Amino acid sequence: MHLFHSPDLIDDLIELPEEEAHHAIAVLRLTPGMRIGLLDGRGTRAIATIELISKRHCSARIVERYEAGPERTAHIHLAVAPTKQMDRFEWFVEKAVEIGVDRITPISTERTERGKLRIDRLQRVAISAMKQSQRLWLPRIDALTEMNDLLAEPLPAQRLFGWCEGEHRSLMEAYRPNDDVLVLIGPEGDFSPEEATTLRTAGFQAISLGSARLRTETAALAACTWMSLAQQR
Amino acid sequence: MHLFHSPDLIDDLIELPEEEAHHAIAVLRLTPGMRIGLLDGRGTRAIATIELISKRHCSARIVERYEAGPERTAHIHLAVAPTKQMDRFEWFVEKAVEIGVDRITPISTERTERGKLRIDRLQRVAISAMKQSQRLWLPRIDALTEMNDLLAEPLPAQRLFGWCEGEHRSLMEAYRPNDDVLVLIGPEGDFSPEEATTLRTAGFQAISLGSARLRTETAALAACTWMSLAQQR
């Protein structure tokens, strides 16, 4: 059964968002009476029957709803400097959503090479990864955010940042799976020493992912994988 | 300093392999007297001075050698069914080499959709990932292998395969970081029930990576990440 993302599943008669409708009509060529699956990305999965199909619109009537609780015992929030090549960051978002993450914040830092980011594209990647992996929760993908603006938010007690110089522990030693976490991963060329000091002052602990030098998107995904799987031990 | 792969660093005067020479000459436009780094992919790193540059050839004299022991306490061997889209398998190889793996065997199974594989391309991907992550060991990348031929090889005591149906444990419970391991990851559509029986009979334990349905390349990389990081705890 084909799955579609529809943020609001409260009423029984729903209208698919434009992109999803286009996919249902022009690509899959669905017709009235067919059954589809709906995900609101907030824990609800529904089964619906297509009612009306027009050139641009597709409406469906919900016949069954299924609610699921949170996927994880503790919240996983990754803040990652976007890579120079957009496809590498999109790939990270796809894989992180498949493996399990609650929130991704692209951060701009001193050495971040990308000033703009197509968040709508990243959100599309996240939605299709959610469907692909049959998850019921859509992670939140933020707009490109200044690191200092993120630090001004209310933060979880467990705060980590990738940093291989000077004193640091490994993520594998440091991570506490039962507590919410925010992990910052810097750009190619890493955080500046000043940024590292700012982070330590803000209560962030420096962590590494072993000996090898990892690309930004690899480090971010490795951290995401370790934490998400450690919660499921 | 630019790094080049040169499988044989025994003599002091070495000739770069054709592709590496092309990169040095045509792309980086290096000239005699310049210093370069050399990796044999078997634990040796050398510093050399370029001696001669011609249209196609680049020779260098080694001035310093550094030998490193094995990167891991226990061997990690992943056997993975190639994906329909080649780029997904190439990125799995790139990321696995960055994160840490000893051997990758593409396997053909009942439901594997790809009959041919450009191993030379995968090896190039592995070499550049080794340089990128500044590793001294190049993982072995095998040709496409029938699953049953792999099972006929001498195998490590720790044998796992990805399988979410029926009785199974999670990789996180099952994996013993101090022992060599072979992990099999099936294609989209998974192993057939007959193959699963064959594997259990051959002493393989069924493992999962949590609740979500992961693409082949995502499951393979998640398993690789967990095992490689678990060894570095």
Image (cartoon, coloured by chain):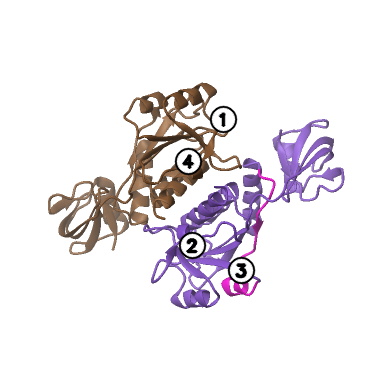
Chain colours: A purple, B brown
Which label sits on residue B189?
1
Between A169 and B126, the one lying in front of the other is A169
Disc 1 crowd rating (10 Å Cα; few below 14, some 14-19, many 20+) is few
Between B124 and B187, the one lying in front of the other is B187
Mark 2, secondary structure of its residue:
helix
Q: Does A149 lie within the magenta span?
A: yes
Residue type, numbered disc 2: Ala
Residue type, numbered disc 4: Ala
Residue B62 vs residue A179: left or right? Answer: left
Quote the CA–CA distance across marks 4 and 1.
23 Å
Q: Quadrant of the N terminus of chain A?
A: top right
Q: Chain of mark 2?
A: A
State yes or no: discs 3 and 4 in contact (Cβ < 8 Å). no
Mark 1, secondary structure of its residue:
loop
Q: Check if mark 3 and mark 2 are on a common chain.
A: yes
Q: Mark 3 sits on what residue?
A: A145
Residue B60 vs residue A14: left or right? Answer: left
Image coordinates for residue A229, horizontal then vertical, percent: 54, 49
Mark 4, secondary structure of its residue:
helix
